[in-house]
Image: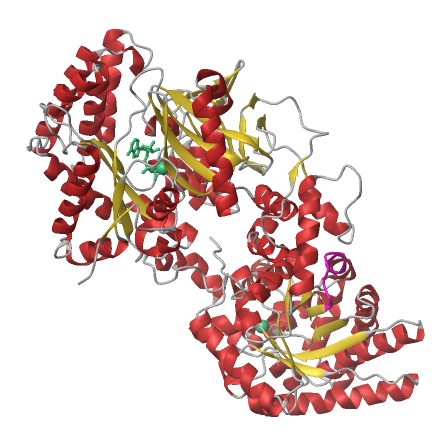
Amino acid sequence: MARYVYDFTEGGREMADLLGGKGANLAEMTRMGLPVPPGFTVTTEACKVFLATGSEPEGLDREVAARLAALEEAAGRTLGRPDDPLLLSVRSGARFSMPGMMETILDIGLNDESVKGLAKVTGNERFAFDSYRRLVQMFGSTVMGIDSALFEGELARLKRARNAPDDLHLDAADLAGLVGTYQELILRETGEEFPQDPVEQLRRSIHAVFSSWNVERARIYRRREHIPDDLGTAVNVQTMVFGNLGQDSGSGVAFTRDPATGRPGVYGDYLPNAQGEDVVSGIRNAIPLAELQRLDPASYEELCGHMRALEDHYRDLCDIEFTIERGKLWMLQTRVGKRTAEAAFFIAHQLVDEGLISQDEALERVSGEGLARLMFPRFDSESVAEPLAHGIPASPGAAVGAVVFTSAEAVRRAAAGEKVVLVRQETTPDDLPGMVAAQAILTSRGGKTSHAAVVARGMGKVCVCGAEALDVDPAARRFSTNGTTVTEGTVISVDGTQGVVHLGAAPLVDSEVVRYFENHGQPAGEGEQPVVDAVHRLMQQADAVRRLGVRANADTPEDAARARRFGAEGIGLCRTEHMFLGERRRLVEAMILATTDDGRDRALAGLLPLQRQDFVGILEAMDGLPVTIRLLDPPLHEFLPDRTELAVRLAATEAHGDAKDPHEVELLEAVNRMHEENPMLGLRGVRLGLVVPGLVAMQVRAIAEAVAERRKAGGDPRAEIMVPLVDTVEELRIVRAEVERVLSEVSEETGVTVDCPVGTMIELPRAALTAGRIAQEARFFSFGTNDLTQTTWGFSRDDVEAEFFSAYLDQGIFKVSPFETLDREGVGRLIEIAVAEGRATRPDLKIGVCGEHGGDPDSVHFFHGAGLDYVSCSPFRVPVARLEAGRAALEGTQGSDSR
Ligand code: ADP
Ligand code: MG
Ligand code: MG
C-alpha cells in the first residue's frame, strides 16, 4: 500500500522529490543530531492525489493520526489539550524552494480553552494570546481565504488605539480582545466559526497547503524559474517551539557565508521575542545576528557550531532558520542557499581551496546565466553624482528605470516597453508580478533576508532594500528623501552592488569580468577583484574538460577581434548582408535593376573589391582559425527602398504635377515585381544564387581573392564557404560546382592554391531529413536553429513573439520560448536525424550550430549530447558557451543537482 507520511527520523536529503526540500533537509538535520523539533512530512505524492481528485488519498488520515499519536506520546502532551496543549506548525515545502510562496500556519491546537492552559503552563498570558491571535489570523487568511489585509487592519487599529509603536506594546488583554475581533471577522466574512477542534484545524491546514500549490503567485514564480507545474508540495507538521516567550527567546535567519558576495562570516538577522515569520516579513526591524553573541552567548556559540557542521555536511553555503525558546536553540530549516552570481563563483572557487569540493564540482556549481550576469555593465563610480539615498546592497547589478509604486503599474508600464523600478516600503508575495516586470526593486524597510531581497536575488534582479531615508507614499505615488521628492515616472538609477540610488540615468561602464575577458582572459594581476580570480579559474577548468568547440557569429573585423579575445576558436557564422548596405546599396540596386548582362556585371564588379577588403580584415582578425562565410541570404528586396514609401513619394510628385524621377519609377517597378507575400519563404538563400547570375561567383571571388591576399602577406586564412537555406542536394551540387570553378580560376590567376571547404546550413526540415544525401556535397553542416525553429513550428519569430507568445507561455504550451531555448522534442529531433545521417555518409563531416541557441546554456547541453563539434554564438556569449560546454561535459559524471 502507498505510504504518504514519513517521520523526520525516517527521511533524508536524498528524498527531496518525495519530501520536498524543507522536509528532506529537516530529516537530514535530524539525522545529523541537530536540535530539530520533532515532526513528520506528508509527501508530494499525497499532494498530487489531492490536486488531481480534490480529496486526500485513501488512508492519509489514518497515517497522520498514527504519527500524531507518536508525537504526542513522545511529548507527553496531546494536541490542543486544554491544560497543557501540544501545538503544531504546518509548513509547505516543495522540491525547489519557493521563498514566501506557500503558506505556513503556526500554533495549531490553540482554541478558546487550550489558550488558557498554555498561559498557565508558560506562566505567560500575553504570549498565549499572542500565539492564538497569530493562529486565528493565519488560519483565517490561508485556510478560510480571508484577505490578510483585513486582519492587518484590525491589528493596526488596535495599535493606534493603544498608542503602541509595535506589537510588543500590546498586552495580554489587548491580544485576547484581538482574538475576539478576529473571530468575529471570520464569522462575518465566511459565515463560519473559527474551528475549535484541533484535529480539524490540522486537517484543513494540510489541505490548504496542498491547494496553495496552485495560487497565482506560485504559478508565476514557477514559470519564471522553469519549475514544472506538476511536482506538488509536501507538508511538514512539526512541534511548535516558541520564540515569542519573552526577551530570552527569539527567532532568526542566518547564512553561513554572505549570499551577496560569498565572503565567509556570520550573516543574518535576529529578532528577540518573535515568531519566525516576523523576521522575514520585515514587520519589525531585526538586529544583526552578530549581536546575539552579546544577548545569549551560549546559544550563539551553539548556532555557529551547527552552521559549521552544516557547511561541512552539505559542502556549500547553507541558509538556516532558527528559534531560541528560553535560551534553548532549535533548528527550524536549512537549505543550500540562494546566492548572487558573484557569490556563486566566489564560493565555488573558495570551497575548492578549502578542500571541500573538486574543481569539477566547482564548475557544476556555477552557471552560464550567472556568468552572463557578471558581464552586465555597472555604474561608473568616477562620474556619478551625489547619491539620492543609501540602502542595503541586497542583489547586485546596475539598473535604470522609471519609478513606480505598485505592482500593477510596473506590469502595465513594462508591457508597454518601459523600464521601471518598483519602489515599495517592503514587498509581499503579492508584488511578485511587478518584481518580475521591474528592472530593480527598491524598498525602504527590511534587511538582506527580507522578502524583496530574497526574491530579487533568486531572480537575479537588482535590489536595494532598507533605504530608510526614503519616505514612500504609495497613495500619492511619490517618495521623498533628504528634501527631494520623486514622483511616479521619474527615472532613477539603482546600484545593487553598492547599495545606492541616483536620480536620473547614471553612466555605465564595463564590468570587471568583461575587462578580464577583453584582456584575453588574463587577470590584470595584483589587486584584481576576487570574483575575477574565481571566474578565471573556472573558465580554465571549463576549457580543460569541454569537448565542444566554441566559435562566434561575427560580421566585422572588430567583432571578430573581440570574439577572439573572449576565447572564440573561429567564426561559425560570418553574415555578409551588411556588406551590401550603406553606400553600396547603389551598386546592389544597379545589380537588381540591370536589364543587360553587361550592366549587371558592372555592378557586381563594383561590389567585388569592397567585399574583398571586408574579408581581408576579418580573415586577418581570425588568422589561423576557421571563418565560415555565409553567402548572401536575405531576399533581395530588403536592399531596395520600402514599397509604400516609394509609391507615396511618386504619387505626391504626380499630384504636384512635377515630373517623376525615372530612376524612382524603375525602382518602384522592381519593388513591385519582387514583392513577396512571405519573403522569408520566398526568393532567398541558395535560391538567389541559382536565379541571379553572377551573384555567387562575385562573392566567392571576393572570398578567394581575400584568401590569396592574406596568404601572400604571410597569413594563415581559413575561409569556409557556407550555402544558406538548402532544401535539397541538387541545389548544393550546382552552387558547389560554381564555387569550385571560381576557386580554381582565382588559384590560377593568383598563383595561390585556394581551397575553401564548402558546406551548408541545415535550417529547413527537408534538409535535416535528407541530410544523408546533402552530406555528399557538404564538407560541413551548420544548424541554423533560428530558421529551423521557424520552419519546424511554422511560425515567424517576428510575428509570434509580439502576437501570442505570452498567451502561449501563460497557458503553459511553452515552458520557455523555443527561440530562446532549443525545442529538443521537435527541432532537436531533426538535428539528431541530420547528425546521424550526415555522418553516415561522411564520417568526418564537421557539424556546428550558428543560431542564437549556440549561446543558450540549456541548448549548449543539448548540442553537446547530440555530438556536435562546435557551437557558435555572439561574441558576448562566447564565455557563457565555453563555461556551459565544460559543464555539459561533466553532466552525468557525478551526482549533480543544478538548481
Ligand atoms: P517559508 O517556507 O516561507 O520560510 P516556513 O515553513 O519556514 O515558511 O515557516 C515560516 C516561519 O515559521 C519559519 O521561519 C519559522 O520560524 C516559523 N516556524 C515554522 N514552524 C515552526 C515551529 N515548529 N516552531 C516555531 N516556529 C516555526
Ligand atoms: Mg522558512
Ligand atoms: Mg537562416
- Which segment is the magenta one? 562-570
Residue 116 position, x and y percent, is: 13, 19
Return the x and y of residue 76 as percentages of the image width and height: 17, 32
Q: Is residue 409 left or right of residue 41?
A: right
* Horizontal relation, residue 109 to residue 36: left or right: left
Task: Using the image, determine if residue 587 lies above or below residue 476.
Answer: below
Residue found at x 46% / y 35%:
306
182 falls in the magenta region: no
Q: Colour scheme in the image?
A: secondary structure
Whether residue 440 is visible to the viewer of this picture, yes or no, is no
Relative horizontal placement of residue 569, taking residue 65 as reference (left or right): right
Q: Which residue is at the far top? A: 163
Magenta region includes residue 569:
yes
Above or below 623: residue 304: above
Residue 693 vs residue 191: left or right?
right
For the N terminus, the image quarter is bottom left
Q: Quadrant of residue 891?
A: bottom right
The percent coordinates of residue 383 (x first, y second) are 71, 29
The answer, for residue 105, to whether it is visible in the render is yes
Residue at x 39% of width, y 50% of height: 96
Q: Position of residue 507 (x, y in %)?
A: 66, 35
Which quadrant of the picture is home to ligand 3?
Answer: bottom right
Q: Quadrant of residue 358?
A: bottom right
In front here: 188 or 252? Answer: 252
Residue 217 vertical position relative to residue 869 in the rendered view, above or below: above
Q: How many marks?
A: 0
Q: Could you tell me which residue is drawn at 34 percent across and 19 percent down?
A: 273
Residue 731 found in image quarter = bottom right
